[in-house]
Image: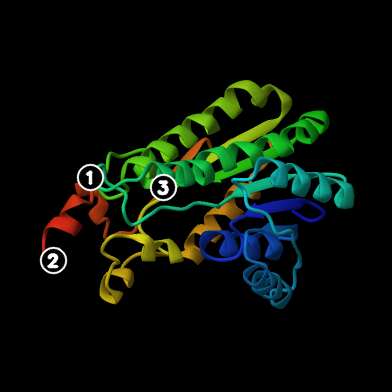
Amino acid sequence: MNGKIAWVTGGGSGIGQASAVELARGGATVVVSGRRADALSETAALIKQAGGKGEAEAVDTADKQAVERAGAAILARHGRIDILVNCAGTNVPKRFFKNLAAADWDRVVGVNLNGALYCTLAVLPSMRSRRDGLVIHVVSYFARYQSYLGGAAYNASKQALCALVHQINIEEGMHGIRGCAIHPGETVTPLQKARPKPPSPEDQAKMLKMEDLGRVVRFIAESPAHVCVNEIVVTPTWNRLILGGGEMLLAPKIE
C-alpha cells in the first residue's frame, strides 16, 4: 500500500482506529475522520507510533456538506483517495418499537446509511477517473442474520448498507472500483455501551477485538486489484448472536 491514500471514517475509536493503524503499518497515508478532534489526535499519535503517516480531518458523516468538504480537502492535499474505509456507526439504547423515537431512527439511519452514502459519493468520481479504488464499509453481522438485539433502525440501516455495497460492485466494477462489506459479530468497541444491557467484562473477553477487524481491513486492502472481496463475515468463536440476541435481554444469563 506504499503511496496510497486511505480515508477512514469513525477513526477516533474502535474498528476505525484499529483499521487506520493497520493501513498505516501497511504503508498507506491515512486520513482519519470523526466528530471528536481529541479522539482523532489519539489515533494520529498511534499511527505515528506504528511508524506510519496519519492526518486528522474532523467531520460528522451524517452532515452531507461537511463530508463533501472533507473529501474535497483530502483530494486537494493528496490528489487521490485510493481506499475509503467507512467505520462510522451508531445505535441507541431505546431501539425497540416499544420505545424507539423517530428522532433516534433518523440519527441512526443518518449515520449508518446516509453517512456511508455521502462518503461513497465523495470518493467515487476520482476513483472512476483513475479506474481504481476500494470502498470498504464495516456493516454488521445483523445485516446478514436476523436479530432482535440490534433494534429496528440499526438492523434496517445495516441491511440497506449491505445492498449499497453490492450496488457499488454492480455499477462501478467495470471502472475498476471494488466494494466490500465486512460483517463483524460481537466486537469490543465503545458502541457496546449503547446496548440496553451492556455486556459483562466476562462476555467481552470472548468477543472479537477491534484489532482483529483492523487486520481484516488490511487484508482486503492489500489484495490485488483483480480481487474483489464482496462480503466477509467475521465472528467470535463463541458466537452467541447465532441465536438472534433477544435472549441476552430476556434471560438472566447465557451459558
Q: Residues within 10 Å of mark 3 (few under 14, many from 20)?
A: some
Work out whether mark 2 precedes mark 1 in sequence or the reverse, and give the earlier one: 1
Please state the horizontal and vertical placement of residue 245, each as a whole percent of the image.
23, 51
Question: Residue flagged by tag 1: what amino acid is it?
Answer: Lys
Describe the element under mark 1 as helix, strand or loop.
loop
Give SS at disc 3.
helix
State which tag comes first along the sequence, 1 or 3. Answer: 1
**Does residue 180 appear left or right of residue 172 in this picture?**
left
- Earlier in the chain: of badge 3 and badge 2, it is 3
| Residue occupied by mark 2 | 253
Q: Is residue 64 above or below residue 129?
A: below
Which numbered dot is residue 104? 3
Amino acid type of the residue that numbered disc 2 sits on in the rendered structure: Lys
Identify the residue shown where x is 39% and y is 44%: 154
Q: In this orientation, does residue 174 appear?
A: yes
In the rendered image, which quarter is residue 137 located in?
Answer: top right
Q: What is the three-letter code of the residue carrying label 3?
A: Asp
Place of residue 22 in the rendered image (x, y in percent of width and height, measured from the top left): 63, 63
Q: How is the image coloured?
A: rainbow
- Relative to 193, say whether 102 is above or below: above
Circles 3 and 2, Cβ within 8 Å, touching? The answer is: no
Q: How many marks?
A: 3
Residue drawn at 31 percent across, 53 percent down: 94
The residue that mark 1 highlights is 98
Asked if one can make out residue 139 in the rendered structure from this viewpoint, the answer is no
Mark 2 is surrounded, within 10 Å at the Cα level, by few (under 14), some (14 to 19) or many (20 or more) other residues, namely few
